[in-house]
Amino acid sequence: MKNIRNFSVIAHIDHGKSTLSDRLIQLCGVVTAREFHDQLLDNMDIERERGITIKSQTVRLPYKAKDGQMYVLNLVDTPGHVDFSYEVSRALSACEGALLLVDAAQGVEAQTLANLYLAMENDLEIIPVINKIDLPAAEPEKTANEITQDLGLSAETIQKCSAKTGLGVEDILEAIVTHLPPPQGDPEGQLQALIFDAKYDPYRGTVISVRIVNGTLRPGDTIVFMHNGSEYKVEEVGWFQITRNQKDILSAGEVGYVIAGIKTLSDAKPGDTITRKDDPCTTALPGFKEVQQVVFSSIYPISADDYEELAAALEKLQLNDASLTFQKDSSAALGFGFRCGFLGLLHLEVIQERIEREFDISIILTVPSVRYRITLQSGVVQMIDNPSYFPDPSTIEQVEEPFIKANILIPERYMGGLMNLCVEKRGENITYNYPTTGRIELHCELPLAEVIYDFYDKLKSLTQGYGSFDYQLLDYRISDLVKLDILVNSERVDALSQLTHRVRARERGLAACERLQEEIPRQMFKIAIQASIGGSVVARTNISALRKDVTAKCYGGDISRKRKLLEKQKAGKKRMKTVGNVDIPQSAFLSVLKSEH
Amino acid sequence: MKDCAVRRAALNRMNDLGLYLHVPFCLRKCGYCSFYSEAGRRDSSRWLAAVIRQLRQFFSPRPLTSIFFGGGTPTMLPPEVLRDLLAECRQHFFCAEEAEISLEANPATVDLSALQTLRQAGFNRLSLGVQSLHDTELRRLGRPHTAAEAAQTAKLAQQAGFANLNIDLMCGLPDQTLQSWSETLTQALALRPQHLSIYELTVEEGTPFAQQQKEGKLLLPDEDAALRMLETARQMTEEAGFHRYEISNYALPGCECRHNINYWRNSDYIGIGPGAVSCLNGMRKSAVADAVEFCSRIENGQEVWEHEECLEPEAAFRETVIMGLRMTEGLALDELRRRFSIDAAAYYGETLARLTKQGLLELADGRLRLTAQGLLLANPVMAELV
Ligand SMILES: Nc1nc2c(ncn2[C@@H]2O[C@H](COP(=O)(O)OP(=O)(O)OP(=O)(O)O)[C@@H](O)[C@H]2O)c(=O)[nH]1
Ligand code: SF4
Ligand SMILES: [Mg+2]
């Protein structure tokens, strides 16, 4: 056990975690040159397309150190985006140490700080790594300065590397062996294994990622999930080495997977403890903190026939992503669906895409909302995140909306613009300090609803990519909330309703009308699109009637092709939702979700 | 009710059989063209041998009611070659006495003697690709001829004895105005053709025009202007005694193109040459659209078919409906019932009622047809019926 090192690679988004992981994997010879490709651990299509990590991934690396001994390094590559910090915290629970990467050209950013705090909460040993030193804009000295002053880490342990070229990466392997502690635990003790991740495999049932804290686990053992007492017989255990590598035993200190024919998805719960039936442990390991969903939206299948499939898809996704919540919902326009909770808008987009890709179900989402606290005149308090349940305004005593505390890091020159942005977004109690020269750390209290709308996009463009931010939920504050309805040819489309602050209502309403105008195809009659609050129209657009759509030429050679085009048009129409007599495509519903282009 | 002769004529019509021969050569490619054809003069002897061999592979006991040499530009071939090819067709198949035999030609690719040879060879209908009678517009389209040459060729054709002349025109062109369009129409009508095909420009994928459109370099008249051009065409042709019998086709009474009507009735036809489509007994096949590949397959005794399609009876019925609706006379429901054993009114039920109520379709005298409004919105209507 003294030759095992369990560590995560953590950093702000894009600072090079996955690239460094690639290099470490290659240096340890886990994959052949032929099998290798960049960002090896980002294996979901959506990760590869967007160039970001969404899921943490574990890989076991054999390493022969300079002291001549063989070590086992369990590396967990983690995502950097704020929406996925729950992934990071789960990964950290399986580790004793962490490599904290900092991009030498960008310096310390908001997520660098946030992830450092997470690692410290888990009592992890930290090795700071300055990455991308090959970049012309790299400022390794300045970055080292930020790491010592800003983060309070010791200068001696800092590693410098280029994950891209491989420069300095071997030293990192040595540092892992010498600086990070081996795991503790008793292989002879009663089995305690922490479930830190899970994934559904259609052939094998649930595949559980575990960290064995005490004891051992072998195929044939009967295991018990401590949260509900369900029992399974272990079919297979092993390590993740890009693919699953089957082994005879997992013992204390190790990280690996367990397959036990688990078909009931709710049995394997990340954060739960597995023990052995014949010699059970007495207490479960501390689990994970419950996450707070901050954004809510309803998901409806385009075709009502897909409802059951959508339910199954959400259940499987939830297994792989415990931060997703869902419950039944229904809409006059869209039929039956699910109200889902997310950790942020990127999280929402990822779930949307995974449902469409991994499960091949076309869906419509409703406008995302935060959760409001509404006190009725009767004294009853309701938590509302769905516009459909917004009470009659005349019965409302007061509405409160969630506020967050934002921690924003920017180069000093963008200060003016940022102040304006914070004020525009109804920010309160703005304070700031200078952690190192030239950089500003700004704290500001903002309504969460403004933040999920387009705050991050605006911050990024305002600071040309140099601004970063992180936030925590703070409290609820009084708000002047209204329900904004969208009407298409005078019919209210309930799925397009949204809750918004009164000062935003008109601009949101107009934005929605304009996007619908772009996305709804012209039809044989004129279409009026209106946004209204409690019956009074605040914005409107029109779509003029389609007057001409005819194929000029169609002779013998064209018949099949032209017919197929018409069939496609017909299929497209089927995929639309009809409200009143207007056909509204999926893209129109989705366009309203997006903040400004 | 109907007398025997009429019924026989109707039946005969239903049993029309057309022959299409594709000549895939053009002087150069026009910017909007998506037909399969190759630019430049090239040796056509190999192609000629191949089409003759393909022709001989077909057998039909039914007489041909129409023959159509199209392209491409068939008149890129010497008139004697066309004459011999037609003779070959007439020899191999039975050919009805009164068969319509059309030839597509481009202005300035034929002179009087060529036209005389062709007329004598048996071609009785000439279809001339004029498109516009304004040189600037012709240049913008990439047409290899002038307006004067087009008018001249039309006159020579009549002089050579073509009493059934079609002129192809296009509207909705880049830089075209309502003014220039009505001038083109006036001049075209003055040439006294028996038939006009009037197409609104369609930007087809993969053409230079599509590329220009993507780059913002193709400025077309807006919907309003295009509508007015189509309306002008309808009015001016009507005043000149033409009637619109299909979405894009206008004829003097009795001069409707029998060959094309056969397509819109979704009946049988034989297609010869690379890229040509045949449809016999519900089986549709298209030959590889590549002259070299086509020839070598024929030479090696291989199949030339690239795509084959045989629709289920219901799908074939629906396809017949949408094709038939292209014609202003529409579809006779009893004929449809005889052919497919499907009652269109019952089959489409609700949809039909709605489209009728919207004023896009009408059901009268046992025929289903598009209204004037429906003719402009044929695609969305057909997309509901297909
Ligand atoms: N020049 C240079 N580029 C690097 C280096 N390391 C990573 N990159 C580039 O930085 C970008 C982000 O790298 P990733 O490894 O995907 O970053 P990440 O930290 O895993 O990103 P997330 O998982 O989305 O948080 C990619 O374009 C890499 O090629 C480096 O050392 N030098
Ligand atoms: S002449 Fe006709 S077939 Fe040839 S390129 Fe022009 S439009 Fe196409
Ligand atoms: Mg990554």
Image (cartoon, coloured by chain):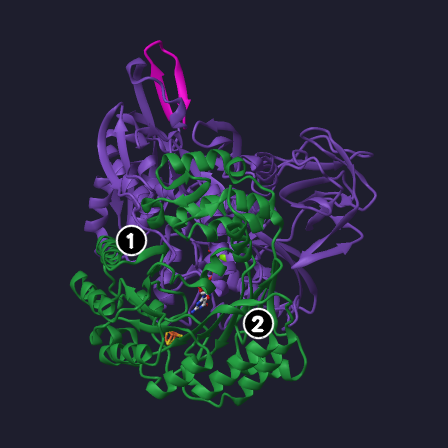
Chain colours: A purple, B green
Mark 1, chain letter? Answer: A
In the image, the segment drawn in magenta is A372-385
For this orientation, the residue located farthest to the left is: B179
Residue appearing at x 39%, y 49% in the figure: B378
Q: Is residue B45 above or below residue B224?
A: below
Find numbered disc 1 in the image and state the secondary structure of the residue it sits on.
strand
Q: Residue furthest top?
A: A378
Crowd tier of the residue under label 2, counting other residues whose Cα lies within 10 Å: few below 14, some 14–19, many 20 or above: many
- The amino acid on which the numbered mark 2 sits, given as a three-letter code, is Ala
Q: Nearer the viewer, residue A527 or A16?
A: A527
Q: Is residue A117 visible?
A: no
Q: Tell me the subunit letter for badge 2.
A: B
Q: Which residue is mark 2?
A: B287
A502 in relation to A545, above or below: above
Instruction: Give the residue type that dot 1 points to.
Output: Ile
The label on residue B318 is: none
